[in-house]
Amino acid sequence: MRLIFLGPPGAGKGTQSERLLRYLRIPHLSTGDMLRSAIAGRTPEGARAEEYMSSGQLVPDPIILELVAARLEKPDCMSGALFDGFPRTLGQAQALDDYLQQHGRPLDLVLELRVPDEAVIKRLSGRGRTDDRPEVIAQRLKAYWSQTRPLTDYYSQRGLLETIDGIGSPDEVFDRIKRAVDKRQSSRTKRPLPPTN
Ligand code: ADP
């Protein structure tokens, strides 16, 4: 199964991704993690990304697309993937669509975890990552609403979007996610197989 996990910073994607990965046994493609490891490894991409990340802005698409393309080449991604924090712009979404289409690996589902800004700010303030300072949080939220949220329309038009209420205990939220995933998986197995010739 190939799915995208959308949601504002602090919506609880990290916690829920972990559970979802264990449930579906697919690789985790987190661009945030890829960028942080590029920075730690002092790669040229890391050096370029750092200034954007520390101010809460999105890293330019070409850097992101390069990191993701390299990851998607790995054999473990053939059977499925959880895209976490990617795509975050329309350009990234279109590039991902092109890639997946060319490789005959369609997307199955886009989960949008919905949490109001007030809750997000409260959660992030207690976390302590270097980009969790109040002014950087505000910028990250702004980037989410202006650049990433429009992707929900893009995927909803393609019949891929499921919106999940992100308020509740981690178990409650995961139950909702699991229901959406199970529903999609059962409709997928009922889909007629493409012709083999
Ligand atoms: P969060 O969802 O809490 O913001 P992430 O780890 O997903 O955390 O992202 C941290 C930062 O990394 C973002 O603020 C942004 O600067 C950068 N980043 C991560 N993924 C992307 C992406 N797909 N496109 C552009 N920038 C990204």
Image (spheres, rainbow, N blue to C red):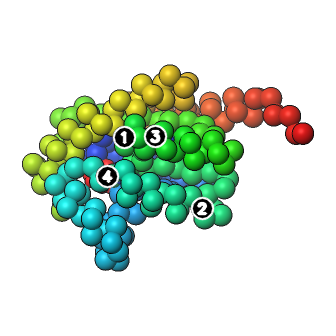
In this rendering, the answer to whether 47 lies above or below 178 is: below
List the single residue furthest toward the top. Answer: 157
C-alpha distance separating marks 2 and 1: 22 Å
Answer few, some or many: residues within 10 Å of disc 4's Cα (few below 14, many 20 plus, some between 14 and 19): few
Amino acid under disc 3: Ala
- Asked if residue 54 lies left or right of residue 171, the reply is left
Total number of numbered discs in the rendering: 4
Mark sitting earlier along the chain (3/2) = 2
Q: Which mark is residue 73?
A: 2
Q: Secondary structure at mark 3?
A: helix
Provide residue 2's location: percent of width, then percent of height. Answer: 59, 45
Mark sitting earlier along the chain (4/1) = 4
State the residue position of label 3: 93
- Asked if residue 139 lies left or right of residue 84, the reply is left
State the residue position of label 4: 60
Quadrant in the rendering for residue 108:
top right
Amino acid under disc 2: Glu
Residue at 23% from the left image edge and 57% from the top image edge: 53
Q: Are marks 3 and 1 in contact (CB under 8 Å)?
A: yes
Amino acid under disc 4: Pro
- Asked if residue 14 lies left or right of residue 140, the reply is right
Q: Is mark 1 within 8 Å of ligand 1?
A: yes
Q: Secondary structure at mark 2?
A: loop
Residue at 21% from the left image edge and 45% from the top image edge: 140
Residue at 62% from the left image edge and 30% from the top image edge: 183
Q: Select label 4 or label 1 by which is in front.
A: 4
Mark sitting earlier along the chain (2/1) = 2
Amino acid under disc 1: Thr
Provide residue 172's location: percent of width, then percent of height. Answer: 43, 37
Answer few, some or many: residues within 10 Å of disc 2's Cα (few below 14, many 20 plus, some between 14 and 19): few
Q: Secondary structure at mark 1?
A: loop
Q: Is mark 4 within 8 Å of ligand 1?
A: yes
